[in-house]
Structures are given as C-alpha cells and as structure tokens.
Image (tube, rainbow, N blue to C red):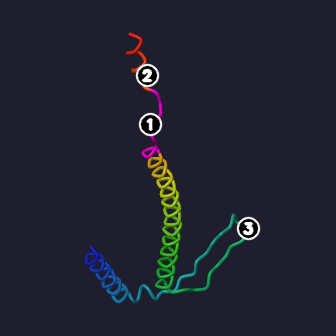
Amino acid sequence: MRFIKVLLLLALFVFSILFFTQNDDALLQELTLKLDIFSITTLHSIPLPLSVLILASFVAGSILTMFYFVVDKFRATSRLKECKTRMASLEQEVNSLRNMPITEDQPYAEKEENA
C-alpha cells in the first residue's frame, strides 16, 4: 500500500511539473485581485503572477487540511484514552465479581425442607 501511495505522489509531482512547464506563458501573467466590500471600499492586491496565486492557494488548502486532521487526531486520541480508562474499570469490576464468594442462601433448599 505504501508503494502505491509513493507511486501516486510521484505521478502527481511529474504531472505538476509538466503543467507548469507547458503553461509557462499563461502562468506568468500578472493578476490583481479586487475585493469590493458593499460598495463602501474596494481593496486591491499587488500584481502577482498566476503561478504564485495557484501555489498560495495550494499551500493554504494544505494547511487547513492538516489543521482539520490534527484536531480530529486529538479528538480521537482523547476518546481512545477515555474508552481505555472505562474498559480498565469495567475489567476490574468483572474480576472483583469473579473472585467474590457465593454467600447467599439457596431459596430452593428451604422449600424442599418444608414439603
């Protein structure tokens, strides 16, 4: 499975390099981003090449995805610790019940004596 992941990652890397080298002219065009806030004010970015914007959006998406998975990992680790603690207490309870001597009277023995 690890071999397949490495192979797919390598293929993605090769296709990315091919994409950037074949579209060099289009990716070097400069773009200025504009944000119009309810006709109150308009914000403009500095002129940036399209390749920088693509790379920045990829990095931002990667960071957000990593943050999501880190939070999920902490949540799962916390839940696992809680379940292990509960399992240990339940195992201790089962062991104490297993080792407890039977001291209660037999209700059926009294009925046989009376008959």
In the picture, the quarter occupied by the C terminus is top left
Residue 90 percent location from the top left of the image: 48, 49
- Asked if 73 appears above or below 106 in the picture, the reply is below
- Quarter of the image for residue 37 reads bottom right
Q: Which residue is mark 2?
A: 107
Q: Which residue is mark 1?
A: 102
The segment highlighted magenta reads: 97-105
Q: Which residue is mark 3?
A: 40
- Asked if 102 appears above or below 64 in the picture, the reply is above
Camera-side residue of 78 and 42: 78
The reply to whether callout 2 and callout 1 are in contact (CB within 8 Å) is no
> Which secondary structure is most common in the magenta stretch?
loop
Camera-side residue of 79 and 23: 79
Residue 109 percent location from the top left of the image: 40, 21
Q: For the residues marked 2 and 1, what is the alpha-carbon distance in whole angstroms? A: 13 Å
Instruction: Give whichever of discs 1 and 3 has the lower sequence position.
Output: 3
> Amino acid under label 1?
Ile
The local crowd at label 3, few if under 14, some if 14 to 19, many if 20 or more residues have their Cα within 10 Å, is: few
